[in-house]
Image (tube, rainbow, N blue to C red):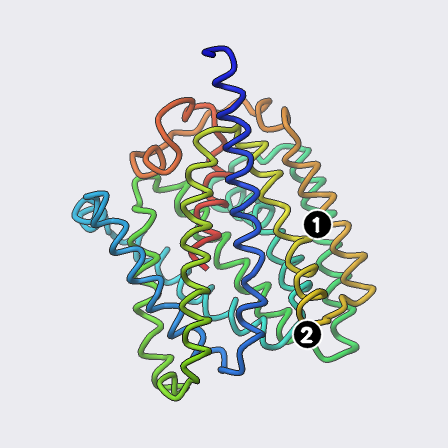
Amino acid sequence: MDIQKPHSEETLGSAFVVLAALAFSTAGIFTKVVEADAWSVIFWRGIAAIAFVILYLGLKGSLREEARAFRWPALIVTLCLASGTAAFISAFKLTSIANVSVIWATAPFWAACLAFMSMRENPGARVLICSAFALLGVVITIRGSWDICLWRGDGLALAMTLMMATAMVIYRAYPDTPTKLPAAVSAALLLPFALALSSPFTTDPHEIGLLALFGLVFAAGTVLLMEGARRISSAKAALFSALETPLAPLWALLILAEWPALATIIGGTIVMGAVVHAQWPGSLARRAAKPHLNAHMLRDIGQDGAAERSLEDLEFRRLRDRL
């Protein structure tokens, strides 16, 4: 029994991460299936996010600890998360779900570039080559959108990705920055803008229910991702998390009959190839530097084997649910 237990734990962890990717891939569907404008979506989704994060921190007894650790790096992260969320939801209203998914998949590569420019952190030849291919995929995707007037949404998706990449680098430079409270504060910061720029209280009650479900699904995805990351390697978790990119346009096709453009298919294929190749098991293990994991990260992934996990991947998976 003891010999089989690790295998069953790994299987369970893999299932959790796959389910988390499934949950995250529904963002575009929830945003587009409702008639409410982007700021109304941001408002009701933000209410659900605030309630979940505060309740989660309260049950775990870590709300006071995260509040004490909320210093200027956390404030910058909060601003990045707030602007990223506004761009993320608005992008779905202005471009295709497939385009947003393709552009968002390049976040780890942008983070690697920003870390090199700000901290002289060497990403390695493998990541640099994959980054170049990912950028090519994004250029092809956006160039295809230019002909069909979707470029504004693509631009917002790219801005969102850069904001999230910036937050990743801040977490790397200041590893004691809290990981959950900024999510709640960023959602709270957007509420006044949502009230000023839209009329969320006139939203159809049925749609409010869907948007509340939107927040619940993402909350469940967050928990599943945390529990799954405790049981499998970071490289394998990153690969399973990449399932979000092909799944999102698949739901768009099945539910909304939204066909991706040819340029999106070509660009997405290139980006997915770059992501999978960069995160292939064994590539991350060859990195010489082993990053320091702070107490907040250890609580997210569990204590066992934490020193062997990739900080870049952990940050990417933790920040994705902040959107």
How far across and down, in percent of the image, does residue 5 sit?
Answer: 48, 18
Q: Give the image location of residue 305, x and y in percent.
A: 42, 22
**Callout 1 secondary element:** helix
Disc number placed over residue 151 in the picture, else none: 2
Nearer-N-terminus badge (1/2): 1
Q: Which residue carries the number 1 mark?
A: 134
Kind of residue at disc 2: Trp
At a point 76% along the width and 68% down the height, the residue shown is 259
Vertical arrangement, residue 203 with respect to residue 233, above or below: below
Question: Considering only vertical position in the picture, is 312 above or below 254?
Answer: above
Amino acid type assigned to the residue bearing label 1 in the image:
Ala
Please tell me how crowded label 2 is: few (under 14), some (14-19), or many (20+) other residues with Cα within 10 Å.
many
Foreground residue, 102 or 3? Answer: 3
SS class, disc 2:
helix
The percent position of residue 274, horizontal first and vertical second, equals 71, 43
Dividing the picture into quarters, in which one does residue 112 lie? top right
Is 58 or 124 nearer to us in this picture? 58
- Residue 235, position as x, y percentages in the image: 58, 32
